[in-house]
Image: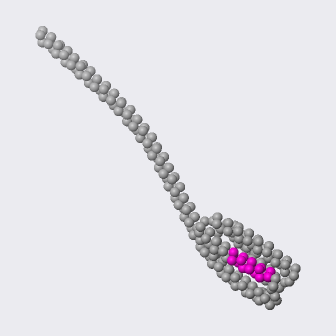
Amino acid sequence: MSEVFNGYERQYCDLSANLSKKCSSALSLDGEQKKQKLSEIKSGLEIAEALIRKMDLEARSLPPGVKSSLLVKLREFKSDLNNFKTQVKRITSANLNAAARDELLEAGMADTKTASADQRARLMMSTERLGRTTDRLKDSRRTMMETEEIGVSILQDLHGQRQSLLRAGDTLSGVDENVGNSKKILTGMTRRMNRNKWTIGAIIAALVVAIIIILYFKLTK
């Protein structure tokens, strides 16, 4: 629940209790005292209306799950404010006689007590609903944080695997280069061996021819 809304709510509840006392006391006053008391009540009603407007703006800026509950509570405050306005109209009636004033006093006090009891019950129910909504929001936020941590961990693992693959690619490139060099060396060695074979064969052939010639001359003598 919004702390700003809670602050406005506490101010309104205190102001509502004060207005209720002033309305009750105004019924027993006459003349200038009554006018002064009515002036104080009207000033309090203006402040109450301003607080309700602030609560309305704050409630509408919150997420839907919280906003709906606060708007229900706000309607109760508006109804309470309308009750005060009705009481003020009754008090300011110029033709109100003593009997009607006594009756209005009793009815006003009864209505105020009934309205206060009903309002407290509704406020308690609304508070409980808002508490449950807040708990659900906290659970959702905790789940989001855990999901975010898992995502970060997966990204870190993927980054590590990418680095390993890059290093393996560099190693394979080095191996390919070494294999190419080895192939060139073996090819050169093969060519030299082939040349040596022909050279040795020619030398052997020359030696055989020389031996044959030598044997021929020895035998002919």
The answer to whether 60 appears left or right of 206 in the picture is right
Most extreme residue toward the top is 221
Q: Does the magenta stretch include residue 78?
A: yes
Q: Which colour scheme is used?
A: one colour
Q: Is residue 179 above or below residue 193?
A: below
Q: Tell me, yes or no, if residue 3 can be seen here.
A: no
Q: In this view, does 209 lie to the left or right of 142?
A: left
Residue 46 image-quadrant placement:
bottom right
Residue 213, quarter of the rendered image: top left
User: Residue at the location (52% across, 57% down)?
Assistant: 151
Out of 87 and 202, give the one closest to the viewer: 87
Q: Main secondary structure of the magenta part?
A: helix
Taking depth in this image into account, of 104 and 191 the one nearest to the observer is: 104
Front-lying residue, 219 or 190: 190
Considering the image in quadrants, where does the C terminus appear?
top left
**Where are the magenta residues, as a range?**
77-93
Q: How many marks?
A: 0
Q: Residue at x 81, y 88 (%)?
A: 97
Q: Does the magenta stretch include residue 99?
A: no
Query: Is residue 38 among the parts visible in the rendering?
Result: yes
Return the residue found at the far left.
220
| Rendered residue at 68%/80% (across/down) | 119
Horizontal and vertical percent for residue 25? 81, 83
Q: Residue 17, how many percent across, how many down?
A: 75, 78
Residue 74: percent from left, percent from top:
67, 73
71 to the left or right of 158: right
- Residue at the extreme right: 32
Q: Quadrant of residue 122?
A: bottom right
Q: In this view, does 162 lie to the left or right of 215?
A: right
Pinpoint residue 2: horizontal percent, then vertical percent. 66, 67
Q: Which residue is drawn at 56% across and 66% down?
A: 140
